């Protein structure tokens, strides 16, 4: 059996439908596990209708006057941020599995983009023997055109590259994320490498667990968390050889097409409402498909079930 893991926080039924409907529409019969928070009843009903297994999570926060919210990594608490990893480590000292205990502690305080990796790791530790392959994926901006596990897998873990026109150092946003996360020295080390997208990773279950362990170790040692630190940590894991058997797949050369940059238009054709590669085969996973409004409209026309 195969499994898809994702996180959905504060998403509406309308936002969730393309992901879950398209995944079932292409014939995927494995398990779908979403870690969820702040979903209304309509969204929950939609997910349950399609057999999604829900894992509710809580995030530590303080409700302030006027509807404002104070979260652990709020800028107003910046002097405390470097203490969080040490406190999580101290809280895990008595645990049999200290990394898992640290991950559970960090999951409650981390930014959601980072917390998802802690949740996935904690879940897969108990479930790894149940699955053949596992897909970790974004939810809001992902669409499926065929079963993501339909192709033979010739590596333990596959991560997917973005627009080939950029490196980490030449893409301002990615450079800023790495610099803010690892400093100038970290950026210098990663600057010449291509950008790997953190939104979609897949592989054999044991390989994905190895990847998650590496991500957990990276994220638990960060002195601060910012938007984009998940991407920075992911690229360090990919490019510094922290996961045995990890393969980096060029955009458009595998089952995943990442559509946030501009190069994807040169790699595809739109045929009968599907994006296909140069050989005429539909990509299994379209990530960031909503970045181009006209293309998104054509793709969504094939989603049924209303």
Image (spheres, rainbow, N blue to C red):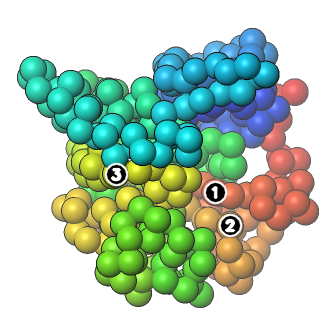
Q: Residue drawn at (78%, 56%), measured in percent from left and top?
A: 290
Q: Which residue is mark 1?
A: 287
Contact check, label 1 and label 2, Cβ < 8 Å: yes
Q: Residue drawn at (55%, 61%), measured in percent from left and top?
A: 256
Q: Which residue is mark 3?
A: 223
Q: Residue drawn at (81%, 41%), measured in percent from left and top?
A: 303
x, y percent for residue 46: 73, 20
Would residue 195 be visible to someone looking at this image?
A: yes
Q: Earlier in the sequence, mark 2 or mark 3?
A: 3
Which quadrant, please, contains the N terminus?
Answer: top left
Between 29 and 119, the one nearer to me in the picture: 119
In 3D space, how far apart are the residues under numbered discs 1 and 3 (Cα atoms)? 30 Å
Q: Secondary structure at mark 1?
A: strand
Would residue 161 be visible to someone looking at this image?
A: no
Please tell me whether residue 68 is drawn above or below residue 136 in the rendered image: above
Q: Nearer the viewer, mark 1 or mark 3?
A: 3
Q: Residue drawn at (71%, 78%), measured in percent from left and top?
A: 262
């Amino acid at each position: 059996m195969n499994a898809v893991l994702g996180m959905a926080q504060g998403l509406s039924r309308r936002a969730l439908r393309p992901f879950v409907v398209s995944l079932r529409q292409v014939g995927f019969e494995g398990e779908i596990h979403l870690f969820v928070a702040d979903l209304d009843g309509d969204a929950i009903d939609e997910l349950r209708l399609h057999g999604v297994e829900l894992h509710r999570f809580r995030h530590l926060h303080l409700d302030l006057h006027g509807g404002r919210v104070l979260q652990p990594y709020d800028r107003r608490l910046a002097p405390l941020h470097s203490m969080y990893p040490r406190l999580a480590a101290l809280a895990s000292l008595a645990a049999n599995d200290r990394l898992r205990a640290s991950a559970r502690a960090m999951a409650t305080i981390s930014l959601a983009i980072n917390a998802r990796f802690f949740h996935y790791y904690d879940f897969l530790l108990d479930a790894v023997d149940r699955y053949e392959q596992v897909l970790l994926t974004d939810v809001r901006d992902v669409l499926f055109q065929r079963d993501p596990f339909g192709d033979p897998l010739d590596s333990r873990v596959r991560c997917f590259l973005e627009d080939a026109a950029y490196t980490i150092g030449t893409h301002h946003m990615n450079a800023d994320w790495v610099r803010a996360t690892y400093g100038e020295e970290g950026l210098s080390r990663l600057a010449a490498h291509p950008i790997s997208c953190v939104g979609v990773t897949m592989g054999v279950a044991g390989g994905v667990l190895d990847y998650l362990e590496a991500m957990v170790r990276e994220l638990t040692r960060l002195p601060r968390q910012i938007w984009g630190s998940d991407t920075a940590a992911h690229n360090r894991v990919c490019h510094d050889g922290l996961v045995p058997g990890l393969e980096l797949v060029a955009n458009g050369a595998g089952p995943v097409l990442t559509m946030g940059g501009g190069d994807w238009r040169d790699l595809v054709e739109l045929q009968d409402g599907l994006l296909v590669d140069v050989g005429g085969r539909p990509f299994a996973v379209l990530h960031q498909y909503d970045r181009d409004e006209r293309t998104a409209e054509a793709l969504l026309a094939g989603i049924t079930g209303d």
